[in-house]
Image (cartoon, rainbow, N blue to C red):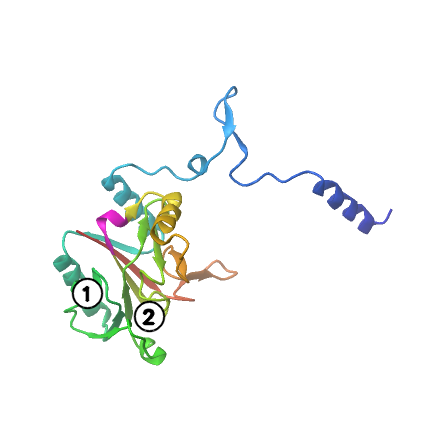
């Protein structure tokens, strides 16, 4: 038997054994109590209270090199964005009309491109920041759940080098299963054309393991929970 036939024989033998479905294996809690595993068996535990979820999201954001701020009012959020615009030297930002963006972005002291009725891509690329709302914040992973409907289309969260996310307190949810349940409840069969979990700023690492932020999208991500 040639080496090739030997390898193919081992492959055929292995294919006779059904693969275990991910998330459906047997997890042994104790020697006498095996049970079918669920997402809660292997995902990080998330606290029940808002305060616990905030602290977990904050810790994850720091690990991911994203900025996170909990502010008590829309006025405080607007003041924070004005400080950020000054510190970063922003000249123009892009945003969309939403419950939070409408009031918070009204007086930033920079030029504002509103994308609701379309926009010129070249003008969008001159914007220093994209300011969007979101569907939810996921405490478990430090992710921001956005869709083309909640974030003013596809480009606002991708093209500008800075992405600022505005969220309400009740949008901070526990985990990924809750996020998918929220999508189903909100959109049903009419899912948006784009659904994305943004987990930190865009990043890549080369063969020397040097982390580079902003390689394929925004180099800076800031999340503000308002109220």
Mark 1, secondary structure of its residue:
helix
Residue 83 in view of the camera: no
Magenta span of residues: 167-171
Residue at 27% in and 49% down = 171
Residue occupying the far left of the picture: 75
The residue pinned by badge 2 equals: 160
| Upstream in sequence: badge 1 or badge 2 | 1
Mark 2, secondary structure of its residue:
loop
Residue 17: percent from left, percent from top: 68, 38
Residue 220 in view of the camera: yes
Q: Nearer the viewer, residue 98 or 61?
A: 98
Residue 158: percent from left, percent from top: 37, 67
Residue 102: image tag: 1
Residue at 28% in and 63% down = 132
Residue 153: percent from left, percent from top: 34, 67
Q: Residues within 10 Å of mark 1 (few under 14, many from 20)?
A: few
Q: Nearer the viewer, residue 6 or 36?
A: 36
Q: Quadrant of residue 120?
A: bottom left
Task: Give left or right: position of 25 versus 38.
Answer: right
Residue 101: percent from left, percent from top: 21, 63
Task: Give left or right: position of 115 versus 192.
Answer: left
Between label 1 and label 2, give the one nearer the viewer: 1
Q: Is residue 104 above or below residue 15?
A: below
Q: Is residue 71 above or below residue 53?
A: below
Residue occupying the far front of the picture: 189
């Amino acid at each position: 038997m040639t080496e090739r036939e030997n390898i193919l024989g081992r492959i055929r033998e292995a294919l006779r054994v059904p693969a275990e479905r991910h998330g459906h294996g047997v997890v042994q809690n104790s020697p006498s109590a095996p049970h079918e595993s669920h997402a809660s068996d292997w995902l990080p535990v998330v606290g029940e209270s808002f305060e616990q979820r905030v602290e977990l999201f904050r810790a994850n954001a720091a690990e991911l090199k994203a900025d996170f701020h909990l502010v008590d009012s829309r006025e405080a959020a607007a003041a924070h964005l004005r400080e950020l615009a000054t510190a970063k030297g922003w000249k123009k930002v892009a945003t969309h009309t939403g419950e939070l963006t409408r009031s918070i972005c009204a007086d930033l002291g920079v030029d504002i491109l509103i994308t609701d009725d379309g926009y010129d891509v070249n003008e969008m690329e001159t914007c220093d920041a994209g300011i969007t709302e979101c569907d939810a914040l996921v405490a478990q992973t430090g992710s921001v759940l956005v869709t083309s409907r909640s974030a003013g289309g596809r480009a606002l969260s991708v093209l500008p080098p800075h992405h600022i996310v505005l969220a309400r307190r009740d949008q901070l949810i526990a985990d990924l299963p809750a996020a998918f349940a929220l999508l189903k409840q909100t959109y049903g069969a009419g899912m948006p054309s784009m659904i994305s979990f943004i987990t930190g700023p865009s990043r890549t690492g080369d063969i020397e393991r040097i982390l580079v932020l902003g390689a394929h999208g925004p180099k800076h991500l800031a999340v503000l929970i308002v109220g």
